[in-house]
Amino acid sequence: MLPEIDVAGQKRLKNSRILLIGLGGLGSPISIYLAAAGIGELVLVDFDKVDLSNLQRQILHATKDINRPKIDSAKEHLLSLNPDININCIGEKLTKNNLIEEAEKSDVIIDATDNFATRFSLNEVSVKTKTPLISGAAIRFEGQVIVFNPSEKTSPCYRCLYDEDISTQESCTANGVFAPLLGIIGSIQANEALKVILDIGTIGQGKLLLVDALNMEFNKAVLKKDPKCPVCN
């Protein structure tokens, strides 16, 4: 019914492939919306198991899934929602070469992880393969989303935003997170992924969207490409 999408756009979604890393608090709403939207192929990567403490925010999984691999409960949930999509599950940590191989076959990479090491690795893969990367993060009451499109010469990358020397042990488990915030951030990531594939609207490329759920404030900062960045320059 949306003229910006129409039948041609729906076919475009059906012919697309998205690589989603992480099936936790962010990956849950992301995967649900992408499956419901009719993405043709979802590649889900997660090597963790469902824990009781996850259920406060990881709405992809249920009480009956405790101790199951997240990829198994995720696939079951998503196929019950839309049995006409293809779901490929990878339940192990991928090597850099494996990530590159998967990224080269994908239209978009979505980073729904919770650690800087993986984020930096996905960024390098994105830049190397020229695959758009949609990055999100959330902790306590604050979250952020940013889109990187390395095929554009002026686009910054994740390494332009954070130095690899950054050291933090902060996590949702250790520091807490307001559950609806993950739904907000994950939904925005799914929103941007669909727009990238459909080539509609204004993409948040290089624009860091900052969300303060406690005060319900949204702010945006423009990220410039770092001329000294060791990854994208």
Image (cartoon, grey):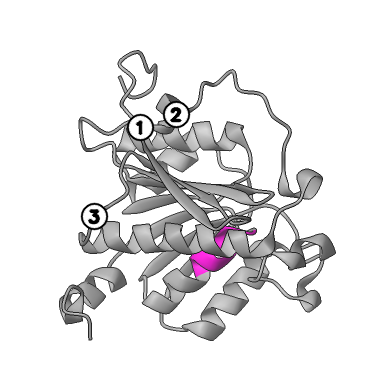
Q: CA distance from mark 1 to mark 3?
A: 16 Å
Position above or below: 56 against 78: above
Question: Which corner quadrant of the image does residue 124 belong to?
Answer: top left
Q: Mark 3 sits on what residue?
A: 202
Q: The residue under label 1 is which amino acid type?
A: Leu
Of 183 and 159, which appears nearest the observer? 183
Position above or below: 119 against 71: above
Q: Is residue 70 left or right of residue 88?
A: right
Q: How many marks?
A: 3
Residues drawn in magenta: 25-31
The main secondary structure of the magenta stretch is helix
Q: CA distance from mark 1 to mark 2?
A: 7 Å
Q: Which mark is residue 223?
A: 1
User: x, y percentage for residue 68?
Assistant: 76, 67
User: x, y percentage for residue 192?
Assistant: 35, 58
Q: The residue under label 2 is which amino acid type?
A: Leu
Query: What is the crowding at mark 2: few (fewer than 14 residues within 10 Å), some, or many (at least 20)?
Result: some
Q: Mark 2 sits on what residue?
A: 161
Q: Is residue 81 left or right of residue 222?
A: right
Q: Is residue 197 left or right of residue 91?
A: left
Residue 10 is inside the magenta segment: no
User: x, y percentage for residue 95?
Assistant: 55, 36
Q: CA distance from mark 2 to mark 3?
A: 21 Å
Q: Residue furthest front?
A: 215
Q: The residue under label 3 is which amino acid type?
A: Thr
